[in-house]
Amino acid sequence: MFFSPIKTEPIPERVLSISQIVADKGPIDEKELNNILIPSELNTAKTSYFRPVLDTAKELKLIDYNGENKIIFTGNKDTIKSLTSFRLFCNSMVFNDSSSDFYKVISCFLGADDKWLSYGSVTTSTEVIRLINAETGIPSLKLEKDVILGVRFWINFLGFGFFQEQAKIFLPNMYIALKDFMLLGNIEKDKEYSVEDFLNSLHHSSSVALKGARIKQTLNLAMSNALRLMHDNKEIELERHLDSEKTWHLFPNDEHEFTSEVTHIIIKKVVK
C-alpha cells in the first residue's frame, strides 16, 4: 500500500482493526484471524479484503509471522490505542520513501493547490488522472481503478484535507497532519521560529508537503491553510518582521490578515 502497489481495500480502520486483534489474541492462525476480521457471509473470493489489509499492517511493521507460521504483533501497543495514535504513527512512517507511489501521489494532491477544484471529481477526472500519470508514471487505468480511490481514504485520515463526498472534490488543508509533524518534530512552546527554522524542525515526513517550497520560499495551499487556521485558533502566531533576512509566501488569500508574506512563527500552545 505505502511501499508497494496502492490498493483500495486497506482503509485505515481495517488496518488498525487487524493490528488490534493480533495484539490482543496473537499468536494467531491466519485462518482464525481472517474469520474474526471478516464475517463468514462476507468472506468470499470476490469480496475478501483480508490479504491486502494483512499485507499493509506488515508493511507498517505492526504484525508478522513467527517461526511457527502464526501471526504475532511486532509493534508498540501505544500506537494502536486509538485512531489518533494510529494516525500519528502512520504519519511518522508512510512518507519515509520519497520514491514510493504513495508518496508521489500525495505530493501531487498537495502540489496542485487549487488547480484541481475546477476539474470536478478527482476520482474520475481525466485531467487529474493525466496530470498524476505525467508526474508519477503510474498507468492511467491503475490510477482510475485503484490508486486515487485507495489514496482518498488515507489522505483524509492522515489529515491533509477533505473530500467533499458528493462531488469528490479535494479541499487541501493539512491542519491535522501539520500538528502531527510538529509533535513528531518536538516543536517547542513559547518559542519564535523563522519560517525556515520551523520547517527544518518538523518531522522529516513533512517533506511530502514541501516540494519546491525551500527553493521558491513559497508554501502550498494545504500548508498555508493549516498555518492560517492555527493562527486563528491562537495555537501559533504568524509574524512578518520587516528586517527579516528571508520572507516566505503563503498561498494568497486576500480575506485573511496574512494575505501572503510571513517571516516568523511563534508557538503559543503545546502541540497535541
Image (cartoon, grey):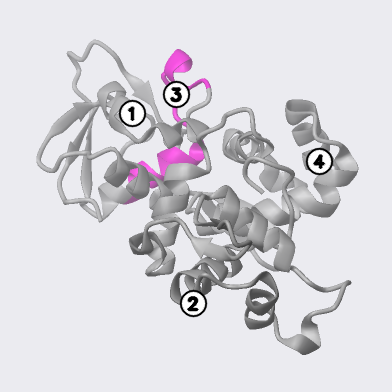
Which sits in the foreground, 70 or 90?
Answer: 70
Up-down relation of residue 91 to residue 34 (above or below): above
Which sits in the foreground, 134 or 89?
Answer: 89
Instruction: Residue type at mark 2: give it.
Output: Lys
Please state if 255 lies on the left or on the right of 106 as rendered.
left
Instruction: Determine the image quadrant of residue 107.
Output: top right
First in sequence: mark 1 vs mark 4 = 4
Please tell me whether the stretch drawn in magenta is mainly helix, strand or loop: helix
Residue displayed at 68% across by 75% down: 34
- The residue range painted magenta reads 212-229
Q: Position of residue 4 (x, y in %)?
A: 70, 42
Please state if 37 lies on the left or on the right of 226 as rendered.
right
Q: Please tell me the numbered disc located at residue 129.
A: 4
Q: Please tell me the numbered disc located at residue 25.
A: 2
Q: Position of residue 257 (x, y in %)?
A: 30, 41
Residue displayed at 28% across by 46% down: 183
Q: Please tell me the numbered disc located at residue 218.
A: 3
Q: Residues within 10 Å of mark 1 (few under 14, many from 20)?
A: some
Which sits in the foreground, 211 or 184?
Answer: 184
Q: CA distance from mark 3 to mark 1?
A: 12 Å
Which secondary structure, mark 3? loop
Front position among marks 3 and 2:
2
Q: Which residue is mark 1?
A: 199
- Marks 4 and 3 in Cβ contact (< 8 Å): no
- Marks 1 and 4 in Cβ contact (< 8 Å): no
Front position among marks 4 and 3:
4
